[in-house]
Image: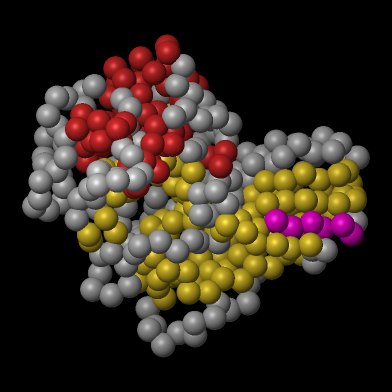
Amino acid sequence: MTAVTATTTGTTGPTRFEVTHTTEYSYPSTVSSSFGELVIQPRDLPGQRCVASRLVIEPEPHDLRERVDFFGNRTTYFAVLAPHTRLSVTAVSRVEVGERISGKGPGEPIGWRRARERIRTAIGTGPDADEAALDARQFVLGSPLVSLSAELTGRLADYAATSFRPGVPLLEASVSLSSRIFHDFTYLPGVTHVTSTIDEVLAARAGVCQDFAHLAIGCLRSLGLAARYVSGYLETQPPPGQERLAGADASHAWFSVFIPGTGWVDVDPTNDQLVDDRYITTAWGRDYTDVPPVKGVIFTRGDRQDLRVAVDVIRLSDPAAPRDPAPPRAPALPADPAPPSDPARPSDPAPPSDPAPPSDDESEPA
Protein backbone atom coordinates (compact mmCIF):
# COMPACT_ATOMS: atom_id res chain seq x y z
CA MET A 1 0.00 0.00 0.00
CA THR A 2 1.42 3.40 -1.01
CA ALA A 3 1.99 5.85 1.82
CA VAL A 4 -0.30 8.86 1.66
CA THR A 5 -0.10 11.98 3.81
CA ALA A 6 -2.15 15.14 3.78
CA THR A 7 -0.77 18.16 1.98
CA THR A 8 -2.30 21.08 0.13
CA THR A 9 -2.65 20.79 -3.62
CA GLY A 10 -4.00 23.10 -6.26
CA THR A 11 -3.07 25.50 -9.00
CA THR A 12 -0.74 28.46 -8.56
CA GLY A 13 -3.82 30.65 -8.29
CA PRO A 14 -7.50 30.00 -7.65
CA THR A 15 -9.62 28.47 -10.39
CA ARG A 16 -12.87 30.33 -11.09
CA PHE A 17 -16.10 28.57 -11.94
CA GLU A 18 -19.63 29.61 -12.72
CA VAL A 19 -22.17 27.08 -11.49
CA THR A 20 -25.77 27.21 -12.71
CA HIS A 21 -28.22 24.85 -11.02
CA THR A 22 -31.82 24.88 -12.28
CA THR A 23 -34.66 22.79 -10.88
CA GLU A 24 -38.08 22.97 -12.53
CA TYR A 25 -41.26 21.30 -11.30
CA SER A 26 -44.36 21.07 -13.52
CA TYR A 27 -47.73 20.08 -12.09
CA PRO A 28 -50.76 18.81 -14.07
CA SER A 29 -53.05 20.29 -11.39
CA THR A 30 -52.84 23.76 -9.88
CA VAL A 31 -50.69 24.07 -6.78
CA SER A 32 -52.12 26.55 -4.31
CA SER A 33 -48.84 27.11 -2.43
CA SER A 34 -45.26 25.84 -2.22
CA PHE A 35 -42.86 25.94 0.71
CA GLY A 36 -39.27 24.92 0.23
CA GLU A 37 -35.72 24.93 1.52
CA LEU A 38 -32.69 25.19 -0.75
CA VAL A 39 -29.06 24.20 -0.22
CA ILE A 40 -27.64 25.00 -3.66
CA GLN A 41 -25.35 27.97 -3.05
CA PRO A 42 -21.67 27.14 -2.37
CA ARG A 43 -20.29 27.87 1.07
CA ASP A 44 -17.00 29.57 1.94
CA LEU A 45 -14.27 27.38 3.39
CA PRO A 46 -10.48 27.18 3.35
CA GLY A 47 -9.54 26.84 -0.31
CA GLN A 48 -12.93 27.98 -1.62
CA ARG A 49 -14.69 31.35 -1.83
CA CYS A 50 -18.12 32.09 -3.22
CA VAL A 51 -17.50 35.43 -4.95
CA ALA A 52 -21.14 36.10 -5.77
CA SER A 53 -24.41 34.18 -6.01
CA ARG A 54 -27.85 34.94 -7.36
CA LEU A 55 -31.03 33.01 -6.70
CA VAL A 56 -34.09 33.31 -8.98
CA ILE A 57 -37.39 31.65 -8.08
CA GLU A 58 -40.44 31.71 -10.36
CA PRO A 59 -43.21 32.46 -9.52
CA GLU A 60 -41.79 35.18 -7.31
CA PRO A 61 -41.89 34.03 -3.68
CA HIS A 62 -43.88 35.93 -1.07
CA ASP A 63 -41.23 35.10 1.53
CA LEU A 64 -37.51 34.52 0.96
CA ARG A 65 -34.95 34.21 3.77
CA GLU A 66 -31.38 32.99 3.99
CA ARG A 67 -29.82 31.51 7.10
CA VAL A 68 -26.79 29.50 8.12
CA ASP A 69 -27.72 26.05 9.39
CA PHE A 70 -26.19 24.05 12.24
CA PHE A 71 -23.33 22.85 10.03
CA GLY A 72 -22.56 26.29 8.61
CA ASN A 73 -24.27 25.70 5.25
CA ARG A 74 -26.07 28.45 3.33
CA THR A 75 -29.76 27.58 3.46
CA THR A 76 -32.62 29.51 1.86
CA TYR A 77 -36.30 29.23 2.79
CA PHE A 78 -38.99 30.34 0.35
CA ALA A 79 -42.78 30.43 0.19
CA VAL A 80 -44.82 30.81 -3.01
CA LEU A 81 -48.44 31.55 -2.08
CA ALA A 82 -49.87 32.31 -5.53
CA PRO A 83 -51.51 29.44 -7.47
CA HIS A 84 -49.13 27.96 -10.04
CA THR A 85 -48.54 24.95 -12.29
CA ARG A 86 -44.79 25.43 -12.63
CA LEU A 87 -42.06 26.16 -10.10
CA SER A 88 -38.53 27.03 -11.21
CA VAL A 89 -35.49 27.57 -8.98
CA THR A 90 -32.16 28.71 -10.44
CA ALA A 91 -28.95 29.48 -8.58
CA VAL A 92 -26.01 31.06 -10.42
CA SER A 93 -22.78 31.24 -8.43
CA ARG A 94 -19.26 32.42 -9.12
CA VAL A 95 -16.76 30.41 -7.08
CA GLU A 96 -12.99 30.55 -6.65
CA VAL A 97 -11.37 27.23 -5.76
CA GLY A 98 -7.75 27.04 -4.65
CA GLU A 99 -5.64 24.69 -2.58
CA ARG A 100 -7.28 21.78 -0.79
CA ILE A 101 -6.02 19.59 2.03
CA SER A 102 -5.31 16.47 0.02
CA GLY A 103 -2.58 14.72 -1.91
CA LYS A 104 0.63 12.85 -1.34
CA GLY A 105 3.75 14.19 0.25
CA PRO A 106 6.22 13.92 3.14
CA GLY A 107 5.17 14.12 6.77
CA GLU A 108 4.41 12.12 9.87
CA PRO A 109 0.97 10.63 9.28
CA ILE A 110 -1.16 9.73 12.28
CA GLY A 111 -2.22 6.09 12.64
CA TRP A 112 -5.95 5.42 12.52
CA ARG A 113 -6.10 3.92 16.01
CA ARG A 114 -4.27 6.88 17.51
CA ALA A 115 -6.59 9.21 15.61
CA ARG A 116 -9.60 7.39 17.03
CA GLU A 117 -8.29 7.79 20.55
CA ARG A 118 -7.67 11.52 20.08
CA ILE A 119 -11.23 12.01 18.85
CA ARG A 120 -12.65 9.89 21.69
CA THR A 121 -10.79 11.75 24.44
CA ALA A 122 -10.84 15.29 23.02
CA ILE A 123 -11.75 18.10 25.41
CA GLY A 124 -12.57 21.73 24.69
CA THR A 125 -10.78 23.55 27.50
CA GLY A 126 -7.47 23.49 29.30
CA PRO A 127 -3.90 23.00 28.10
CA ASP A 128 -4.83 19.81 26.23
CA ALA A 129 -7.86 21.31 24.50
CA ASP A 130 -8.56 20.04 20.99
CA GLU A 131 -11.70 21.83 19.83
CA ALA A 132 -11.45 20.53 16.28
CA ALA A 133 -11.42 16.91 17.41
CA LEU A 134 -14.18 17.61 19.93
CA ASP A 135 -16.36 19.13 17.21
CA ALA A 136 -15.63 16.20 14.90
CA ARG A 137 -16.92 13.71 17.50
CA GLN A 138 -20.52 14.36 16.43
CA PHE A 139 -19.66 12.75 13.08
CA VAL A 140 -18.77 9.46 14.77
CA LEU A 141 -22.42 8.85 15.62
CA GLY A 142 -25.04 7.18 13.45
CA SER A 143 -27.47 9.20 11.35
CA PRO A 144 -30.72 8.59 9.43
CA LEU A 145 -29.08 6.99 6.37
CA VAL A 146 -25.94 5.72 8.11
CA SER A 147 -27.32 3.43 10.78
CA LEU A 148 -24.93 1.97 13.30
CA SER A 149 -26.97 -0.99 14.48
CA ALA A 150 -24.91 -3.74 16.06
CA GLU A 151 -25.31 -6.09 13.09
CA LEU A 152 -24.53 -3.48 10.42
CA THR A 153 -21.64 -2.01 12.39
CA GLY A 154 -20.03 -5.44 12.50
CA ARG A 155 -20.44 -5.93 8.74
CA LEU A 156 -19.01 -2.51 7.96
CA ALA A 157 -16.07 -2.97 10.33
CA ASP A 158 -15.33 -6.32 8.69
CA TYR A 159 -15.34 -4.74 5.24
CA ALA A 160 -13.13 -1.87 6.40
CA ALA A 161 -10.62 -4.18 8.15
CA THR A 162 -8.74 -4.95 4.94
CA SER A 163 -7.76 -1.27 4.68
CA PHE A 164 -7.56 -0.45 8.39
CA ARG A 165 -4.81 -2.78 9.48
CA PRO A 166 -2.82 -2.11 12.68
CA GLY A 167 -0.35 0.72 12.25
CA VAL A 168 -1.74 2.03 8.95
CA PRO A 169 -2.06 5.84 8.79
CA LEU A 170 -5.64 7.12 8.80
CA LEU A 171 -5.45 8.90 5.45
CA GLU A 172 -3.77 5.97 3.75
CA ALA A 173 -6.43 3.60 5.09
CA SER A 174 -9.25 5.97 4.05
CA VAL A 175 -7.91 6.25 0.49
CA SER A 176 -7.59 2.45 0.36
CA LEU A 177 -11.18 2.05 1.54
CA SER A 178 -12.39 4.52 -1.09
CA SER A 179 -10.52 2.68 -3.83
CA ARG A 180 -11.95 -0.68 -2.77
CA ILE A 181 -15.49 0.72 -2.87
CA PHE A 182 -14.76 2.02 -6.38
CA HIS A 183 -13.68 -1.46 -7.53
CA ASP A 184 -16.08 -3.62 -5.50
CA PHE A 185 -19.32 -1.74 -6.22
CA THR A 186 -20.86 -0.98 -9.61
CA TYR A 187 -21.92 2.53 -10.53
CA LEU A 188 -25.50 1.88 -11.63
CA PRO A 189 -28.18 4.60 -11.58
CA GLY A 190 -31.69 3.44 -10.78
CA VAL A 191 -30.95 0.62 -8.34
CA THR A 192 -31.12 2.97 -5.35
CA HIS A 193 -32.92 6.21 -4.44
CA VAL A 194 -32.34 9.18 -2.16
CA THR A 195 -33.54 7.31 0.93
CA SER A 196 -31.65 4.05 0.30
CA THR A 197 -29.85 2.64 3.32
CA ILE A 198 -26.41 1.09 3.48
CA ASP A 199 -28.05 -2.34 3.84
CA GLU A 200 -29.65 -1.86 0.41
CA VAL A 201 -26.36 -0.75 -1.13
CA LEU A 202 -24.54 -3.76 0.32
CA ALA A 203 -27.25 -6.07 -1.02
CA ALA A 204 -27.18 -4.57 -4.51
CA ARG A 205 -23.39 -4.15 -4.63
CA ALA A 206 -24.23 -1.10 -6.74
CA GLY A 207 -25.40 2.48 -6.46
CA VAL A 208 -24.36 6.06 -7.17
CA CYS A 209 -22.12 8.63 -5.50
CA GLN A 210 -24.51 9.25 -2.60
CA ASP A 211 -24.51 5.53 -1.79
CA PHE A 212 -20.74 5.16 -2.03
CA ALA A 213 -20.23 8.18 0.24
CA HIS A 214 -22.66 6.73 2.79
CA LEU A 215 -20.92 3.35 2.65
CA ALA A 216 -17.50 4.88 3.28
CA ILE A 217 -18.88 7.03 6.10
CA GLY A 218 -20.48 3.97 7.69
CA CYS A 219 -17.22 2.04 7.52
CA LEU A 220 -15.26 4.87 9.15
CA ARG A 221 -17.85 5.42 11.88
CA SER A 222 -18.00 1.68 12.61
CA LEU A 223 -14.36 2.01 13.69
CA GLY A 224 -15.00 5.06 15.88
CA LEU A 225 -13.68 7.55 13.31
CA ALA A 226 -15.30 10.84 12.26
CA ALA A 227 -16.65 11.14 8.72
CA ARG A 228 -19.14 13.50 7.11
CA TYR A 229 -21.15 13.69 3.88
CA VAL A 230 -20.23 16.43 1.39
CA SER A 231 -22.40 17.64 -1.47
CA GLY A 232 -21.37 19.85 -4.34
CA TYR A 233 -20.28 19.75 -7.96
CA LEU A 234 -17.47 18.33 -10.06
CA GLU A 235 -16.20 19.88 -13.26
CA THR A 236 -16.73 17.29 -16.00
CA GLN A 237 -15.66 16.96 -19.60
CA PRO A 238 -17.66 15.54 -22.53
CA PRO A 239 -16.60 12.24 -24.10
CA PRO A 240 -13.84 12.58 -26.73
CA GLY A 241 -15.15 13.99 -29.97
CA GLN A 242 -18.42 15.26 -28.50
CA GLU A 243 -19.51 18.80 -27.69
CA ARG A 244 -20.30 19.84 -24.19
CA LEU A 245 -24.09 19.82 -23.62
CA ALA A 246 -25.73 22.63 -21.67
CA GLY A 247 -27.36 21.31 -18.51
CA ALA A 248 -25.67 17.91 -18.71
CA ASP A 249 -23.62 18.20 -15.52
CA ALA A 250 -25.00 17.04 -12.19
CA SER A 251 -24.65 17.53 -8.48
CA HIS A 252 -22.11 15.22 -6.85
CA ALA A 253 -21.30 13.81 -3.41
CA TRP A 254 -18.28 12.42 -1.59
CA PHE A 255 -17.06 11.91 1.99
CA SER A 256 -14.65 13.70 4.28
CA VAL A 257 -12.59 12.11 7.04
CA PHE A 258 -11.30 14.00 10.06
CA ILE A 259 -7.57 13.60 10.68
CA PRO A 260 -6.41 15.02 14.04
CA GLY A 261 -3.69 17.58 13.58
CA THR A 262 -4.54 18.04 9.89
CA GLY A 263 -8.28 18.62 9.59
CA TRP A 264 -10.91 17.33 7.20
CA VAL A 265 -9.71 15.61 4.02
CA ASP A 266 -12.20 15.00 1.19
CA VAL A 267 -12.17 11.73 -0.76
CA ASP A 268 -14.31 10.75 -3.77
CA PRO A 269 -15.03 6.99 -3.93
CA THR A 270 -17.12 7.35 -7.10
CA ASN A 271 -14.06 8.46 -9.07
CA ASP A 272 -11.36 6.83 -6.89
CA GLN A 273 -9.47 10.03 -6.11
CA LEU A 274 -8.81 12.72 -3.55
CA VAL A 275 -10.82 15.90 -4.01
CA ASP A 276 -8.91 18.62 -5.87
CA ASP A 277 -9.58 22.03 -7.38
CA ARG A 278 -12.15 20.66 -9.87
CA TYR A 279 -14.59 20.14 -7.00
CA ILE A 280 -16.95 22.77 -5.62
CA THR A 281 -18.38 22.23 -2.15
CA THR A 282 -21.96 23.30 -1.48
CA ALA A 283 -22.64 21.83 1.95
CA TRP A 284 -21.87 19.06 4.43
CA GLY A 285 -23.71 17.17 7.12
CA ARG A 286 -24.09 13.76 8.74
CA ASP A 287 -25.55 12.25 5.55
CA TYR A 288 -27.70 13.23 2.56
CA THR A 289 -30.77 13.98 4.69
CA ASP A 290 -29.00 17.04 6.15
CA VAL A 291 -28.22 18.64 2.78
CA PRO A 292 -30.67 17.77 -0.04
CA PRO A 293 -30.43 20.53 -2.67
CA VAL A 294 -34.19 21.10 -2.71
CA LYS A 295 -36.87 19.90 -0.34
CA GLY A 296 -40.30 21.14 0.60
CA VAL A 297 -44.06 20.76 0.67
CA ILE A 298 -46.72 21.68 -1.90
CA PHE A 299 -50.49 21.84 -1.52
CA THR A 300 -52.41 20.41 -4.46
CA ARG A 301 -55.14 17.95 -5.37
CA GLY A 302 -52.88 16.43 -7.99
CA ASP A 303 -51.09 13.14 -7.51
CA ARG A 304 -47.89 13.64 -9.48
CA GLN A 305 -45.23 16.09 -10.62
CA ASP A 306 -42.76 16.29 -13.50
CA LEU A 307 -39.21 17.26 -12.68
CA ARG A 308 -36.43 18.67 -14.84
CA VAL A 309 -32.94 19.43 -13.54
CA ALA A 310 -30.01 21.10 -15.31
CA VAL A 311 -26.56 21.76 -13.90
CA ASP A 312 -23.70 23.58 -15.63
CA VAL A 313 -20.20 23.88 -14.19
CA ILE A 314 -18.18 26.25 -16.38
CA ARG A 315 -14.52 27.08 -15.82
CA LEU A 316 -13.90 30.80 -16.29
CA SER A 317 -10.56 31.28 -18.00
CA ASP A 318 -10.80 35.06 -18.27
CA PRO A 319 -9.37 36.64 -15.10
CA ALA A 320 -11.09 39.92 -16.02
CA ALA A 321 -14.56 38.37 -16.07
CA PRO A 322 -17.14 40.39 -14.10
CA ARG A 323 -17.39 39.52 -10.44
CA ASP A 324 -21.19 39.51 -10.37
CA PRO A 325 -22.85 36.43 -11.83
CA ALA A 326 -24.70 36.92 -15.06
CA PRO A 327 -28.49 36.60 -15.02
CA PRO A 328 -29.58 32.97 -15.04
CA ARG A 329 -29.44 31.41 -18.47
CA ALA A 330 -32.20 29.18 -19.73
CA PRO A 331 -30.29 25.91 -19.87
CA ALA A 332 -31.66 22.88 -21.61
CA LEU A 333 -33.82 20.77 -19.35
CA PRO A 334 -33.75 17.31 -20.93
CA ALA A 335 -35.64 14.51 -19.23
CA ASP A 336 -32.66 12.22 -19.76
CA PRO A 337 -29.53 14.32 -20.28
CA ALA A 338 -26.55 12.66 -21.89
CA PRO A 339 -24.21 11.51 -19.10
CA PRO A 340 -20.97 13.43 -18.68
CA SER A 341 -17.63 11.67 -18.54
CA ASP A 342 -17.88 11.50 -14.76
CA PRO A 343 -20.98 9.56 -13.65
CA ALA A 344 -24.19 11.51 -13.15
CA ARG A 345 -27.42 10.15 -11.78
CA PRO A 346 -30.77 11.04 -13.34
CA SER A 347 -33.69 12.29 -11.32
CA ASP A 348 -36.02 9.89 -9.54
CA PRO A 349 -38.55 11.99 -7.58
CA ALA A 350 -41.45 10.62 -5.55
CA PRO A 351 -44.92 11.91 -6.52
CA PRO A 352 -46.51 14.29 -4.02
CA SER A 353 -49.82 13.66 -2.27
CA ASP A 354 -52.30 16.20 -0.88
CA PRO A 355 -50.48 17.93 0.75
CA ALA A 356 -47.21 16.62 -0.67
CA PRO A 357 -44.66 15.24 1.78
CA PRO A 358 -41.20 16.83 1.88
CA SER A 359 -39.48 16.38 -1.48
CA ASP A 360 -35.77 15.63 -1.02
CA ASP A 361 -34.70 17.05 -4.35
CA GLU A 362 -34.73 16.56 -7.50
CA SER A 363 -31.56 15.13 -8.75
CA GLU A 364 -30.04 12.40 -6.70
CA PRO A 365 -26.37 13.40 -6.73
CA ALA A 366 -24.11 11.76 -9.25
Please identify the quarter of the rendering in which residue 111 is found.
Answer: top left
Q: Can you say whether 284 is above or below 235 in the image?
A: above
Q: Position of residue 335 (x, y in %)?
A: 64, 50
Q: Which residues are magenta?
A: 77-82
> What main secondary structure does the magenta stretch of the protein show?
strand
Q: Can you say whether 70 is above or below 304 in the image?
A: below
Q: Does the rendering let one see residue 187?
A: no
| In this rendering, position of residue 88 left or right of residue 198 | right
Residue drawn at point x = 50 percent, y = 49 percent: 71
Residue drawn at point x = 36 percent, y = 44 percent: 124
Quadrant housing the N terminus: top left
Q: Nearer the viewer, residue 277 or 285?
A: 285
Q: Does the rendering let one see residue 74?
A: yes
Q: Position of residue 230 (x, y in %)?
A: 44, 47
Q: Position of residue 175 (x, y in %)?
A: 24, 39
| In this rendering, position of residue 357 left or right of residue 168 | right
Residue that extends furthest to the bottom in the rendered view of this protein: 320
The number of numbered badges drawn on the structure is 0
Q: Nearer the viewer, residue 327 or 35?
A: 35
Residue 266 inside the magenta-drawn segment = no
Q: Position of residue 72 (x, y in %)?
A: 51, 54
Residue that extends furthest to the top in the rendered view of this protein: 151
Please identify the quarter of the rendering in which residue 87 is found.
Answer: bottom right
Residue drawn at point x = 12 percent, y = 53 percent: 105
User: What scheme was used to colour the molecule?
Assistant: secondary structure
Residue drawn at point x = 69 percent, y = 68 percent: 56
Q: Can you say whether 245 is above or below 326 in the image?
A: above
Q: Nearer the viewer, residue 333 or 297?
A: 297
